Image (cartoon, coloured by chain):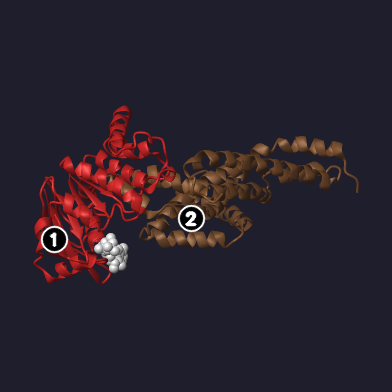
């Protein structure tokens, strides 16, 4: 279970997150929607302390931190329980696909090399890259790089995987391969929080949709409910804008 | 004027005997310089409080003054400090016991440190922030992320500049002459003192420096090709 309570974050004098409360059950696939600049990325980054929240509490599984007082050790504990898939992939450029996935197992989990290698090969096969073990990121397509990114995140067996627009840097014809990998792992019951503009994905895969605007959660609920009968005017307008007819077939 | 090939050869052979001195000064100053420079670059990149302005001052002073001046400041300043401290504690040690080459090694390391800090800093800047964030996201500590992810990429990015620093310090090592260290250039003058064939002697010195420089460039080229294997996106 993941629970956020009163998460606040400002950049200088500009409040970006104005008290976010959110509860996410184990195995849930959460999609976060919202207009540009509403704080979606900032929220994800606060969850693993790539940005330090100014206030609030974060609970991931059995571990809970008070953001105000969290020190190096607490942050480290939180990061061991979360993983992130980046919009720009951020694969380690000087390491092969296999080494990218192994890195966390070797350095953070301190597994013996053979074991780390075995697990990493399996994960890369799972994301369909069993034939690209020794390729460097610069030799892979965007879709392939992102799939390595997903394998790298899976490797540490986190309580939750955070996806920040995992397909928005991809050429349209590569979006499908990445989404289908995310779908596949969603079915295995891994908790994930996905920021995306892919409405089809949100409808098919999510079981919890969160709509954010101006640093707040405006509305949340099951996609069937939220898409067909949004309660808030702002949600309605946003949905209308990204799907002109405003009607969803489910 | 006539060239004397046999004397050039004789000088060349004699100069070879002090190549180790030149290489010692170069390698020590570049190695220490890279250590100092890495520390300085990290302090400046992470804006470590208190140390940050000190580091900035170090860099601007030593990059803003000639290498020979550093050597002379150390040469004349160090004995005052060493003898002062020695007297204060009642130690028998006197600065006259310090070998001349130590002044050159210390001074050139300090000089190289200032230059290397900029080399390392530009290497660090070349590593995108996303690399560090990815390392953090999988639970690495800052030292782990620096050692395993940031430094290897920064090193690869700064190799051409490190090579340049190496060559610069090789040529700069001739200044050690000013504190009576006999390196290649000083030896050339000594060799020529008997027959006044300075041109021939310095020509031999030039050939040796050239040869050493080409060797450094070759080695760097090989290393670059090995290290940059992953980097197919570069312009070069
Ligand atoms: N490090 C930072 N310093 C200052 N401002 C920042 C920083 N990071 C983000 N911001 C500001 O936060 C706002 C964007 O927040 P965020 O990236 O969380 O929005 P988003 O909902 O992810 O938007 P998008 O859909 O465009 O990705 C922008 O106005 C940006 O200027
Ligand atoms: Mg964003």
Secondary structure of residue under mark 1: helix
Q: Position of residue A40 (x, y in %)?
A: 23, 61
Residue at image coords 30%, 29%:
A118
Residue at image coords 86%, 43%:
B195
Residue underneath mark 2: B122
Left or right: residue A76 versus residue A66 is: right
Which quarter of the figure has residue B68? bottom right
Chain bearing tag 2 is B
Q: Which chain is brown?
A: B
Question: Can you say whether B69 is above or below B18 in the image?
Answer: below
- Same chain for mark 2 and mark 1? The answer is no
Q: Position of residue A182 (x, y in %)?
A: 24, 45
Left or right: residue A77 versus residue B67 is: left
Q: Which chain is red?
A: A
Ligand 1 is in which quadrant of the figure? bottom left
Residue underneath mark 1: A227
Question: Can you say whether A55 is above or below B215 in the image?
Answer: below
Secondary structure of residue under mark 2: helix
């Amino acid at each position: 279970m993941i629970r956020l309570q009163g998460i606040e974050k400002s950049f200088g004098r500009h409040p970006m997150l104005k008290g976010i409360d959110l509860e996410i059950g184990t195995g849930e696939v959460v999609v976060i929607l919202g207009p540009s600049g509403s704080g979606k990325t900032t929220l994800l980054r606060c969850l693993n302390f790539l940005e330090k929240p100014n206030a609030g509490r974060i609970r991931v599984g059995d571990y809970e931190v008070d953001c105000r007082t969290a020190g190096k050790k607490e942050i480290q504990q939180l990061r061991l329980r979360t993983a992130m898939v980046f919009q720009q992939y951020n694969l380690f450029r000087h390491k092969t696909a296999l080494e990218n996935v192994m890195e966390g197992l070797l350095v953070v989990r301190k597994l013996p090399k053979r074991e780390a290698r075995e697990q990493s090969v399996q994960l890369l096969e799972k994301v369909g890259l069993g034939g690209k073990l020794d390729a460097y990121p610069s030799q892979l397509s965007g879709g392939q790089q992102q799939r390595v990114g997903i394998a790298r995140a899976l490797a540490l067996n986190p309580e939750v995987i955070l996806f920040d627009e995992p397909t928005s840097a991809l050429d349209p014809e590569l979006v499908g391969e990445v989404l289908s990998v995310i779908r596949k792992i969603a079915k295995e019951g891994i908790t994930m929080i996905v920021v995306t503009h892919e409405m089809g994905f949100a409808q098919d895969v999510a079981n919890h949709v969160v709509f954010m605007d101006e640093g707040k959660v405006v509305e949340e609920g099951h996609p069937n409910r939220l898409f067909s009968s949004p309660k808030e005017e702002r949600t309605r307008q946003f949905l209308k804008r990204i799907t002109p007819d405003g009607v969803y077939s489910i | 004027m006539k060239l004397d090939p046999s004397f050039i050869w004789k000088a060349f052979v004699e100069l070879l005997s002090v190549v180790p001195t030149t290489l010692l000064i170069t390698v020590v100053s570049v190695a220490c310089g890279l250590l100092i420079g890495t520390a300085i670059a990290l302090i400046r990149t992470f804006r470590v409080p208190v140390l940050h302005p000190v580091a900035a001052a170090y860099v601007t002073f030593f990059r803003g003054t000639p290498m020979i001046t550093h050597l002379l400041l150390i040469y004349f300043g160090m004995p005052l400090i060493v003898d002062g401290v020695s007297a204060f504690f009642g130690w028998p040690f006197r600065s006259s016991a310090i070998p001349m080459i130590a002044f050159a090694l210390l001074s050139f390391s300090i000089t190289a440190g200032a230059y290397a800090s900029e080399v390392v800093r530009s290497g660090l800047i070349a590593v995108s922030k996303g690399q560090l964030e990815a390392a953090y996201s999988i639970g690495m500590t800052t030292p782990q992320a620096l050692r395993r992810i940031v430094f290897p990429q920064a090193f690869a990015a700064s190799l051409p500049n490190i090579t340049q620093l190496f060559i610069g310090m090789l040529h700069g090592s001739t200044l050690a002459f000013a504190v009576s260290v006999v390196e290649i250039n000083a030896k050339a003058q000594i060799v020529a003192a008997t027959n006044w064939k300075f041109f021939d002697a310095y020509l031999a010195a030039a050939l040796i420096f050239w040869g050493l420089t080409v060797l450094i460039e070759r080695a760097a080229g090989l290393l670059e090709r090995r290290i940059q294997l992953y980097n197919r996106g570069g312009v070069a």
